[in-house]
Amino acid sequence: MRMSQTVIRPDKNPPKDAATINHRLLVQAGFVRQLTAGIYTYLPWGLRVLRKIEQVVREEMNAIGGEELLMPMLHPAGIWKQSGGWDSIDVLYKLKSRTGKEYALGQSQEEVVTPLMSEFINSYKDLPRAVYHIQWKFRDELRAKSGILRGREFYMKDMYSWHESQEDFEKFYEEAKKAYLKIFSRLGLVAKATEASGGSFSDKISYEFEVLTEAGEANILYCDECEFCVNVDDIGKYDEGGECPSCGKGLLKPSKAAEVGNIFDLGEKYVKAFGLQFSDQEGKKRYPVMGCYGIGISRTMGVIVERFNDERGIVWPESVAPFMVSLVSLGVGEKAEEIYQQLVKGGVEVLWDDREESAGVKFADADLIGNPYRVVVSERTLADGEVEIKRRDSDTTERVKLGELVDRLI
Ligand code: ATP
Ligand code: MG
């Protein structure tokens, strides 16, 4: 993509109302714009990042047998009344049509997916099943001041599964937990699987996946030696500085964290509310065990920015970077076009700063945008048939022969 041909411009001035790093940098670099508190537009480069995160999540959900579908965001009130959510869920947005019909905006999808699947799950032979979608959610959040970490409209992957027995459910639940850890590590994040109570859904244990960051809203205690981690807001029985109850070696350290995903055992709550039953091997009607598995895709994008930045801007991990390369050409005309074409043909995602701007402005914008590599084309190195290459996360500049550039970058 050529910067001269996109409407989007980085802007070194921080937005007035940004209370968090992700909000400030995502606006400055030209990835998002806030329409009003908690509601954002994803500009072209921001959308590329969101899609990359989404694709990693999709691949890993498919790998454990999840089937992707797409459910609506606008829901008739009836299904929410049937589950009890209409009156009990305070974040549910409710609206009325001009003919007086009531609707809700989807804040989660159990009320849609459970009656939907009751048409398809009838026998033990139809189990286990897992379906998911990646869709916008709406929640009337009271505080939406953490940039895209907490939206009133936000992008989520939510998967739902049904099982013949608790045992089968628990087997899948463990697979889902592993898939989650894989997803976050592919995205460059270390997510801690935190045991928590099931919140509004059930009294069963669930996992929250927490990433340490000051911008997060959760308070956790984590072991500095092993994987043990608990949510302080949930479980009062552990002490800061205390010995780790899991490995007995490490000490429990406090931290702020952001919840990037969670998985819940929903038990029979929704299958009972919507009459989803199957015939077991003896022909007896039974309720399956149901689980749900969320990942905040847009929140994860914000968390990545909170974790990977410096005083100059964002430092995207390669797996989610909008482009692999920022190509900076300094007054070399035709030759830069040639190198740009060479990169594009070689399958390298490249953002070419072909604007009539000074080297200083181009370098500052490349750092702010945060693509993993910067390639500089100038007369000085071209004389030797070379360009200059630098990783965003390093201060070391190297020279690379033009013929080796593509190989170096893919
Ligand atoms: P939180 O405690 O942060 O409000 P939650 O328990 O309400 O999260 P779920 O309903 O389980 O979250 O949603 C699944 C995932 O969606 C969460 O783990 C989180 O990553 C993301 N999420 C939840 N609420 C928001 C929001 N308002 N904005 C952005 N992402 C969100
Ligand atoms: Mg919530």
Image (spheres, rainbow, N blue to C red):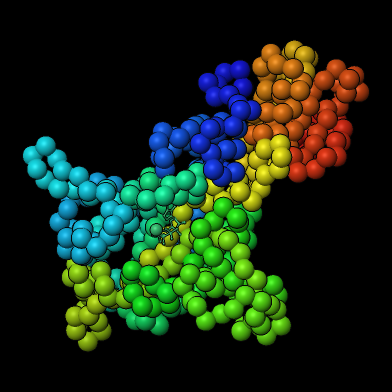
Residue 137 x %, y %: 35, 49
Q: Quadrant of ligand 2?
A: bottom left
Q: For the view shown, which residue lies furthest in the left direction? A: 99
- Tell me: residue 368, above or below residue 131: above
Q: Residue at x 46, y 72 (%)?
A: 234
Q: Residue at x 52, y 70 (%)?
A: 231
Residue 236 in the figure: left or right of residue 227:
left
Residue 308 x %, y %: 66, 48
Q: For the view shown, which residue lies furthest in the right direction? A: 384
When asked about the image quadrant of residue 275, the answer is bottom left
Residue 372 appears in the picture as rendered? no
Residue 408 in the figure: left or right of residue 35:
right
**Front-lying residue, 397 or 383:** 397
Residue 240 x %, y %: 62, 75
Residue 32 x %, y %: 50, 35
Residue 308 in the figure: left or right of residue 82:
right
- Tell me: residue 368, above or below residue 139: above
Q: Quadrant of the N terminus?
A: top right
Residue 310 appears in the picture as rendered? yes
Q: Quadrant of the C terminus?
A: top right
Q: Residue at x 67, y 38 (%)?
A: 313
**Front-lying residue, 327 or 192:** 192
Instruction: State how many labels appear.
Output: 0
Q: Residue at x 57, y 38 (%)?
A: 24
- Tell me: residue 151, above or below residue 373: below
